[in-house]
Amino acid sequence: MNIEMEKILLNQIVERKRELFTVEDNIIIPDVKPDILAIVTTSPNLYVYRKELVNGKIKIDGGIQVDTLYISDDENNHTRALHNSIDFSKTIDIESSNYNNLNFSCELNVKNVEPKILNGRKLSIKINIEYSIIIYSNKETQFIKSINDMENIQRINELINVSAIKSRGETICSAKDTISVENSLADILCYNISIINREEKISYNKLLSKADCFVNLLYLTEDELLRETSAKIPLMGFIDMPGISEGELIQTSYEIRNIDIKPDNVNNNAISIDVEYSIASNTFEEKTLDLIQDLYSPEEEITLSQERVILEQNRKSISDSCNICEKINISDAKENKIYIANVTRNNISDKVSDNFITYEGNISVDFIFESINTGRLELRNQSFDFKHDVQIDGLVRNTEVNTNIEINRSELKVLSDGSEELNVELCFKVDTFCQTTVNLINNVKVEENNSNSKRTSLVIYFVKEGDTLWKIAKKFKTTIDEIADVNSIDDLDKLNVGNQLFIPRHVSTKTY
């Protein structure tokens, strides 16, 4: 017996976790800074420099760059800023630690920051972070593709389309630049970082990942004026992906590893930007497997060893955007000058229907402005609801959906009536796939069938519920064609319960 084997790398989701955890720290005001009278806003930027799965636990090490904008407790009530990096380490227990070859994806988002003034020289900062983890079991499995050199073997095969993971890779790269500002720089107040204009190209077993790191900054001039500037910095990295080829599905994610944004050491009217990223990519290939579902021989006793596995099918990766436009009118803003400090997304839900995913939620925006009434910087928060449909042809209700939503762009435009319009672009990275459970035959044992008769015989059989010609033929060690011929059956897929069938017993002609 000549057996041909085939291998497939299974990528099965074995666990999902989504929870909140809290990072807390106390911040001491540096001696060069004045006391705090009131906090205007706190702006967080999260980074992760290590994620690993060790001894059945996931460990995440990172930090939050927290910029605190405050009103000083002096006679002029100047605007000042604090810049602090708060490190954290989070260990997460998982239930799927008994699986082999585990891999995982992890997304972290800052939900909110709760600052509190303890005294004029000390702040308490509490940051709530949500993590969303998907754990995969990656297992290379062998199965029997074909059996040759066996006479009169009966088999059922089925063509199964699968989305098989092919390769993984990761690289580290940085977005670096120095940008000039028009006015004399006193301090950087806060900033927002996003990735835009993503692009992937395949070349010589490498994936070239290109994007722009967009940084929007608020800063303070020496004459106490609030100003805004931005920078679009190219980001590029090569990821080794052995065997990668055109037409394969590519899923790429960007994660900030470190942030260093500060006044330039050389030029007093410039800002130095250095944002380090981890770029990770997975590739998937569509394969058609000709799987043996069952087999037997009228002449030998065949024992099958099977493994029940879950396969992914019809995997797709879709990028879509939602533009939120809202008119903003803060009547007490001096000269109608309004700036965006923070944009966060909240309470987002998704509903899967045929060919569509509907997302509903809201964005929360912190606006900073100088008040006509108080002469100070003030903060105003506004929330805006949105609803957005992402169309994915072939999507059905039981499709698995993983969504990553990023804020690509947030800006204010001055309208003809003097008011301002908020424009926020949300980018939806949607991965979908279906799952099917199949039996893979991974071993076959063949023994002589001593029970076979050496004479022809017929058995009368009455069709029962759930019977198929395959099941009946296998049970009586005959073939479907022989049963159909004796009983003049034209439609091999149609059997009526209670019908009488004549079953020819197979006559063995093999000499042992």
Image (spheres, rainbow, N blue to C red):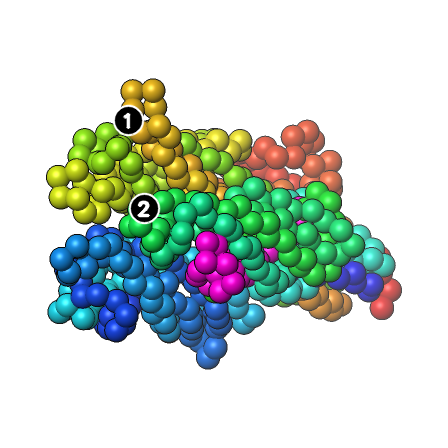
Q: Which residue is found at the position 65% from the left and 46% from the top?
A: 200
- Place of residue 210 in the rendered image (x, y in percent of width and height, measured from the top left): 62, 49
Q: Residue furthest top?
A: 416
- Place of residue 450 in the rendered image (x, y in percent of width and height, measured from the top left): 73, 67
Sequence-earlier tag: 2 or 1: 2
Q: Residue furthest bottom?
A: 55
Residue linked to disc 1: 419
Could you tell me which secondary element the residue under label 1 belongs to?
loop
Q: Which mark is residue 19?
A: none
> How busy is the neighbourhood of tag 2: few (under 14 within 10 Å), some, or many (20 plus)?
many
Q: Nearer the viewer, residue 60 or 96?
A: 60
Q: Nearer the viewer, residue 129 or 266?
A: 266
Quarter placement of the N terminus: bottom right
* Mark 2 vs mark 1, CA separation in Å: 19 Å
Q: Which residue is found at the position 40% from the left and 52% from the top?
A: 184
Residue 310 on the magenta span: no
Q: Is residue 359 left or right of residue 456?
A: left
Q: Nearer the viewer, residue 265 or 120?
A: 265
Q: Are marks 2 and 1 in contact (CB under 8 Å)?
A: no
Quarter placement of the C terminus: bottom right
Is residue 178 visible to the viewer in this orientation of the structure?
yes
Quarter where residue 24 is shown:
bottom left
The answer to whether residue 479 is above or below residue 357 is below
The amino acid at mark 2 is Leu
Could you tell me which secondary element the residue under label 2 belongs to?
strand
Residue linked to disc 2: 226
Q: Which residue is found at the position 46% from the left and 35% from the top?
A: 321
- Place of residue 192 in the rendered image (x, y in percent of width and height, measured from the top left): 40, 50
- Place of residue 313 in the rendered image (x, y in percent of width and height, measured from the top left): 58, 46
Secondary structure mostly seen in the magenta stretch: strand
Q: Magenta segment, which residues?
A: 260-286
Q: Is residue 69 left or right of residue 285?
A: left
